[in-house]
Amino acid sequence: MHTRRIFIKNSLGSLAALTIGSEAFSLACTAPQKEKLGVALVGLGYYSTDLLAPALQLTKHCRLTGIVTGTPDKAKHWQQQYHIAEKNTYNYQSFDDIANNPDIDVVYIVLPPSMHAEYVIKAANAGKHVWCEKPMAVTAAECRSMIDACKKNKVKLSIGYRMQHEPNTQRIIQFRKDKTYGAITQVSARAGYFDSRTDHWKQKKEMGGGSMYDMGVYPLNAARYTTGEEPIAVTAKQSTTRPDIYKEVDETMAFRLEFPGGAITECETSFGKSMNSLHVTCTKGWYKLEPFQAYSGIKGITSDGKLLNAVIPNEQAKQMDEDALAILQNTPVLVPGEEGLKDIKVVEAVYRSVKENGRVLISG
């Protein structure tokens, strides 16, 4: 009898412990996840310094927790300005160690295009989600390798096309979906600025320079999101007014895209002249954004007088917050790697057209 009481007591104790353990496990599973994701910026040039780092201070769902730079003095300055811990500061040789850092959830690649594939793949292999600036890479093959690496490591990949997060841009995309102004017949998209620099990576072929890669993806991407289709052919022409500077890459590129639905887009991009407009002609009217890509905000109008002038505090902050939410909620990102790949396939066709001096078909 005494033995039986001990057995029952021990059994009840074990059952209680099991119950408590199950409740603890259940609570652990339902515990709230991070409210903010830690972001490490890779490459501390102009875009990171003047735009992304300040924007991260305005975000609700992410925060700047790490940096990767090859310049020690720059690292010290950033550590002091943004209170970044020494253990969250890396150079390009120690980059892989980021895998062991729980403070960093996302790695944002802000490097010359020729380096995008290498560091996106490294970040994915480290188990970190990846945001990559546009252009996604130099070749379509590189883009595919980046997508594959992120899928293999079960991390999200988003490309930094901030305009697709911008409300006025989203409104004209909705015009197309709703056929508010009928079918689209023609699109004109131009993006460029005068670059006075004479020895910058944007002027070097080996680093992924050229106006088509840097600014050309703005009108190209706009042509695709306004029509909602993929171009089937391109005719392009490259030119320069400064051949002593632009001897390796294009200073100006004009390209004409043909779409399966019949729409034609006339696009231009340049490092030699300023332009910033998107005009969409439809069967029942038109609409335009001018500027259609600008850090200071987007403005436009429609043929029936609608103003496209929604204002947001910061474009980069909205982009990063929405990408962070997609990670936190495990939903699709707005601009995945596949979107960047589609653009680079067209970019390659643009350069083929220049080389062949004629119309080039774009394979699916």
Image: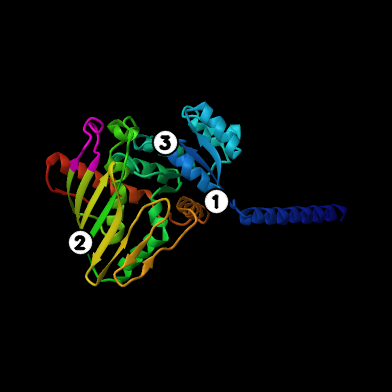
Q: What distance separates the C-alpha of mark 2 from that of mark 3?
A: 37 Å
Q: Measured from the top left, where is residue 343 in percent x and y?
A: 29, 48
Q: Which residue is mark 3?
A: 119
Q: Residue at x 42, y 61 (%)?
A: 167
Q: Which residue is mark 1?
A: 58
Colouring scheme, one of rainbow, by chain, secondary structure, one colour: rainbow
Rendered view: 150 above or below 177 = above
Please tell me whether mark 3 or mark 1 is closer to you in this view: 1
68 on left or right of 132:
right
Residue type for callout 2: Ala
Residue 4: in magenta span: no
Please tell me whether mark 2 or mark 3 is closer to you in this view: 2
Residue type for callout 3: Tyr
Disc number for residue 263:
2
Q: Which badge, 2 or 3, is on the more N-terminal residue?
A: 3
Could you tell me which secondary element the residue under label 2 belongs to? loop
